[in-house]
Image: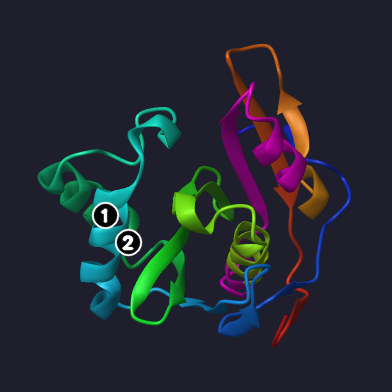
Amino acid sequence: MTDDSTYPDEVSGPFPRPPTAFEDREGRSITVRRYDPDDRGALTAMYEAFDPADRAQGIPPTTEKRITEWLDAITGEETVNVVATHGDDAVGHATLVPDEPEGTAELAIFVLQAYQHAGIGTRLLKTLLGAGAADGFERVWLSVERWNEPAISLYEKVGFRASDTESFEHEMAIRLADQTESTG
């Protein structure tokens, strides 16, 4: 999304920077931290376990080979990634992939089905936005299937606003300022 006028005028935040730890609504100890290459095996396992019914817009991919290629593309040096873990298991992942113009990124977020509806997605999203703001991203956009009301509600709660509702996918955008907290 390249048109600056599609982003809200007001900035959102502050958002926490990783790492952050909390107890989810199910009483599980969850840590959200920046992605490290050592997380690759746990992240691959999470995506292999991902229910195909919850895949949207072709992601996450379904085969190990395609998951590997996809993770190579979205965990590069220029991207921002955070991982939610429960013990040694990855249970959530969110990424910001740089886009044009500079300072803009596209967002994607995934939470393993058994961990959904427990507050992990909200913490994962806020922590990703905090990490992105700290890394200099000012504008973030995403697309979500228009029927996915729980996701749209989450994005709106955090500060995203609809920017394009004319297509099958619902595009949303947020403007960030470098105003972050150290924990959340």
Disc 1 element: helix
The residue segment tinted magenta is: 131-155
Residue 88 visible, this angle: yes
Disc 2 element: loop
CB atoms of marks 1 and 2 within 8 Å:
yes
Which quadrant, please, contains the N terminus?
Answer: top right
Question: Residue at point 26% right, 54% down?
Answer: 71
Residue 37 occupies quadrant: bottom left
Q: Point out the residue furthest to the bottom here.
A: 182
Which of these two is toward me, 133 or 109? 109
Q: Point out the residue furthest to the front here.
A: 26
- Tell me: residue 26, above or below residue 55: below
Q: Point out the residue furthest to the left here.
A: 65
Residue 155: image x %, image y %? 72, 45
Residue 82: image x %, image y %? 47, 69
Q: Is residue 42 magenta?
A: no
Mark sitting on residue 89: none
- In-image side of 148 versus 60 (left or right): right
Residue 177 occupies quadrant: bottom right
Q: Amino acid at mark 1?
A: Leu
Q: Which residue is mark 1?
A: 71
Question: Residue at point 45% right, 60% down?
Answer: 93
- In-image side of 123 versus 75 (left or right): right
Question: Residue at point 63% right, 29% down?
Answer: 148
Q: Which residue is mark 2?
A: 75
Q: Crowdedness of circle 1 by 10 Å Cα count: few (<14), some, many (20+)? A: some
Q: Is residue 144 magenta?
A: yes
Q: Amino acid at mark 2?
A: Thr
Q: Crowdedness of circle 2 by 10 Å Cα count: few (<14), some, many (20+)? A: some
Q: Tell me how many marks there are.
A: 2
